[in-house]
Amino acid sequence: MKVKRKIFGLRLPIAIFIILILTFFSTGYLLIYFTLLRNLSEDGECISFETDFFRFKFPRNWYARAKWENDSLCIINMLTTEYDSFFGLIYYKSWEYAQSIFSGLDLRDGLLITTFEVNRFYGELQKRSQNATLQFLRNGSLEISGYSAIYTIFRIENVAAENLQYNFTGIIIYFLTDRGAVEIVFYTWIDRVWEERYETFKAKILELLVIKRGV
């Protein structure tokens, strides 16, 4: 006569499987928690992020979606936890590589590059939303980490996705560093959150971004 051993009322193999899953989740959570705790800002509101080329802080309710790097590029993508805003940073590690990306454009003309990137983004959205319309709202300049940057603020309306319509509002920034170039993009697709998210982006990320010299 076989005796069926049970733990918490469950058969032994199932109980062991569940315990293992809970252990893995708990370990993963603790690793993430202590990593974030170690990188929290003094006020506890932001998390510090650093690479060999730049460092910045971002709000605790944002998270890094992906980091990708090779010999020529370093790319960071982030989303808000509400899934309503996107932030991306591309660090081109040399002027030559940046020039190869923007072939035919004057690398020194940041406005030409930001409008080119807006049009490229618009073109991608148009592939699935032929009724989408593009508006250039404002061009200007600002200082980031001691460098002069050019920006373009834009709006793309009537973008269709999953039987819904979205209006994208965003900014693209471009500037040269002492070795390479930086491109930053930030946009939202829910109208009511643009002002709040944009102000957070400027104050918590853009104004605190540091580009390291000589790398």
Image (cartoon, rainbow, N blue to C red):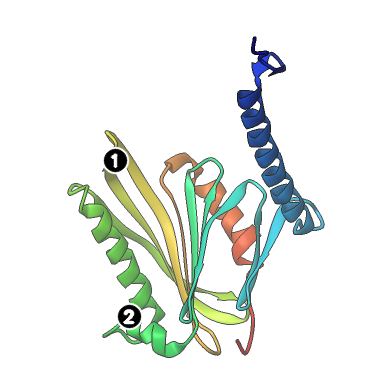
Q: Earlier in the sequence, mark 1 or mark 2?
A: 2
As helix, strand or loop, the secondary structure at mark 2 comes to: loop
Q: Residue at x 71, y 54 (%)?
A: 46
Amino acid identity at mark 2: Phe
| 142 shown above or below 176 | above
Residue 107 seen by the camera: no
Residue identified by numbered label 1: 161
Percent from the top left, x then y, of residue 139? 41, 69
Q: Residues within 10 Å of mark 2 (few under 14, many from 20)?
A: some
Q: Is residue 110 above or below residue 67?
A: below
> Separation of disc 1 and disc 2 at Cα?
29 Å
Q: Quadrant of the C terminus?
A: bottom right
Q: Is any atom of residue 141 visible in this view? A: yes
Which residue occupies 35% across, 54% down? 155
Residue on which disc 2 sits? 102
Q: Residue furthest right?
A: 42
Furthest residue toward front: 1
